[in-house]
Image: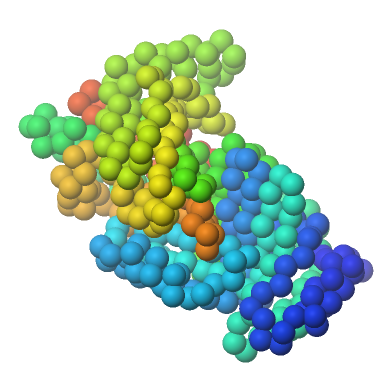
């Protein structure tokens, strides 16, 4: 007989809190020992919506359902979300999970049905786990009071250990076809040679169709264990889930402090320690990759400068090693006056040249004209924020949109003057590997 997920004393504590609060209370919170991903594995089908962000520092924010939700699209989408959050009078304990698309108007392709240009959610059930504590937070919504939520949680079975995915027979198809993507890169190089662009990021997709449908939250459990240095995330809407393990931070705001960490310039990992070190040193001394990285850092610094009183930028990048790829990395620190809202920073930052290009307007126009896929939330943003104004947003990379037996995977490469189409294609193949390996069991 399966064991229950929550300890009896945790359920009892919730019941006591619910009984002691006013009947109209918005939230209760108690300490919990439940693993956030186990909670999603056990309960996501009961809520229809689920969200998760796991940070490299060990912070995990998981949510089920939507006690409060706002969405928007268009050039003013971030300002509209900020206004809706300010007007909602949300409880101070409520984590607000949020995500947004690359394009301001939101995705239009059929596979992205249900995903808007930007969305913010206060979950009905949330777990916020940090290095020192883990809290279960319930938020009341019309039609289901807190007592009803406690009853639902008390009946949840422990899902046990996640199992590796067996895809059965499967197919992998490139979109656009590889020959077309090479042509897009050649066109980008022509625009750069003419002086229209300094850099542009071109993306492509592979569609994996499997005989058996993956269990998305089992995949998330695998990604967290395999890529602890990444921002592991999932955003489920109905029967679709956007999932991945991204190495790149868009921005982090804590009080007056702001941190961004752009990655640009990539190489594969080596077969052994000596090979790996040689590849890393070659990347650090690559004129092409250093130029690509400098374009990104200079652009971000220029965007942030009007909004911060201090800006700390290292003189040269460092090497950031991930499981399959190593990147040039620069951590940029800034100080604000404390009144700047996270959505204002998102509006300033997105899209960075690491995912769009530079000059921004010309690069985005080129991507819109040439790129043969709908990126959806890939290279947008995903993360969480507090009512007090702290926030963490990652750029969704190394990701897939999973619906039933079909998964759309996404990867891109930054094209600069010295780029070669075949090398850029190989870079996208490296970036596909984390999700492709787990979905094809290779």
Q: Is residue 430 left or right of residue 228?
A: left
The x, y position of residue 54, in whole percent, is: 61, 49
Q: Is residue 128 left or right of residue 154?
A: left
Depth check: give the residue in front, 428 or 392: 392
Q: Is residue 38 left or right of residue 183?
A: right
The x, y position of residue 81, in whole percent, is: 39, 67
Residue 301 appears in the rendering: yes
Depth check: give the residue in front, 294 or 201: 294
Give the mark count. 0
Q: Quadrant of the C terminus?
A: top right
- Report which quarter residue 135 is drawn in: bottom right
- Report which quarter residue 262 is drawn in: top left
The x, y position of residue 385, in whole percent, is: 52, 57
Task: Name which residue lies at 37% across and 13% down.
Answer: 285
Relative height, residue 210 to residue 152 (above, below):
above
- Give the color scheme: rainbow, by chain, secondary structure or one colour: rainbow
Depth check: give the residue in front, 258 or 358: 258
Task: Name which residue lies at 63% across and 65% down.
Answer: 93
Relative height, residue 316 to residue 395 (above, below):
above
Which residue is the extreme one toward the right? 1
Which residue is the extreme one toward the front? 337
Residue 179 appears in the rendering: no
Relative height, residue 424 to residue 32 (above, below):
above
Q: Is residue 354 left or right of residue 211?
A: left
Which residue is the extreme one toward the left? 194
Task: Name which residue lies at 55% across and 45% down.
Answer: 231
Q: Quadrant of the N terminus?
A: bottom right
Task: Name which residue lies at 50% across and 52% down.
Answer: 391
Relative height, residue 396 to residue 136 (above, below):
above
């Amino acid at each position: 007989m399966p064991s229950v997920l929550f300890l009896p004393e945790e359920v009892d504590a919730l019941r006591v809190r619910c009984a002691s609060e006013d009947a109209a209370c918005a939230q209760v919170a108690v300490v919990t020992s439940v693993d956030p991903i186990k909670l999603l594995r056990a309960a996501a089908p009961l809520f229809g919506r689920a969200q998760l962000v796991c940070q490299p520092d060990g912070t995990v924010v998981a949510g089920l359902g939507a006690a409060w939700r706002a969405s928007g699209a268009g050039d003013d989408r971030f300002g509209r979300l900020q206004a809706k959050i300010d007007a909602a009078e949300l409880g101070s304990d409520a984590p607000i999970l949020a995500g947004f698309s690359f394009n301001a108007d939101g995705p239009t392709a059929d596979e992205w049905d249900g995903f808007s240009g930007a969305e913010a959610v206060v979950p009905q059930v949330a777990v916020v786990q940090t290095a020192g504590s883990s809290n279960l937070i319930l938020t009341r919504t019309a039609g289901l009071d807190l007592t009803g939520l406690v009853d639902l949680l008390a009946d949840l079975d422990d899902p046990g250990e996640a199992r590796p995915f067996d895809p059965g027979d499967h197919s992998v198809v490139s979109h656009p076809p590889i020959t077309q993507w090479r042509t897009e890169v050649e066109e980008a190089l022509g625009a750069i040679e003419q002086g229209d662009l300094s850099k542009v990021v071109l993306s492509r997709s592979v569609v994996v169709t499997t005989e058996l449908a993956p269990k998305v939250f089992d995949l998330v459990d695998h990604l967290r264990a395999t890529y602890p240095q990444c921002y592991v995330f999932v955003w489920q809407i109905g029967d679709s889930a956007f999932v991945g393990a991204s190495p790149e931070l868009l921005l982090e705001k804590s009080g007056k402090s702001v941190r961004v960490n752009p990655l640009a310039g990539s190489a594969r990992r080596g077969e052994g320690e000596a090979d790996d070190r040689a590849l890393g040193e070659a990347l650090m001394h690559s004129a092409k990759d250093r130029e690509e990285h400098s374009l990104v850092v200079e652009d971000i610094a220029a965007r942030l400068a009007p909004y911060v009183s201090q800006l700390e930028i290292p003189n040269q990048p460092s090497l950031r090693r991930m499981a399959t790829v190593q990147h040039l990395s620069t951590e940029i620190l800034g100080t604000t006056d404390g009144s700047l809202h996270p959505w204002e920073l998102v509006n300033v930052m997105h899209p960075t040249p690491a995912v769009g290009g530079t000059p921004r307007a010309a690069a985005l126009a080129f991507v819109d004209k040439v790129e043969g896929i709908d990126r959806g939330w890939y290279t947008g943003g995903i993360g969480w924020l507090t009512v007090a104004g702290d926030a963490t947003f990652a750029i969704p990379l190394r990701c897939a949109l999973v619906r039933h037996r079909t998964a759309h995977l996404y990867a891109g490469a930054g094209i600069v003057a010295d780029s070669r189409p075949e090398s850029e294609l190989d870079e996208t193949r490296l970036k596909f590997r984390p999700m492709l390996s787990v979905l094809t069991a290779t």
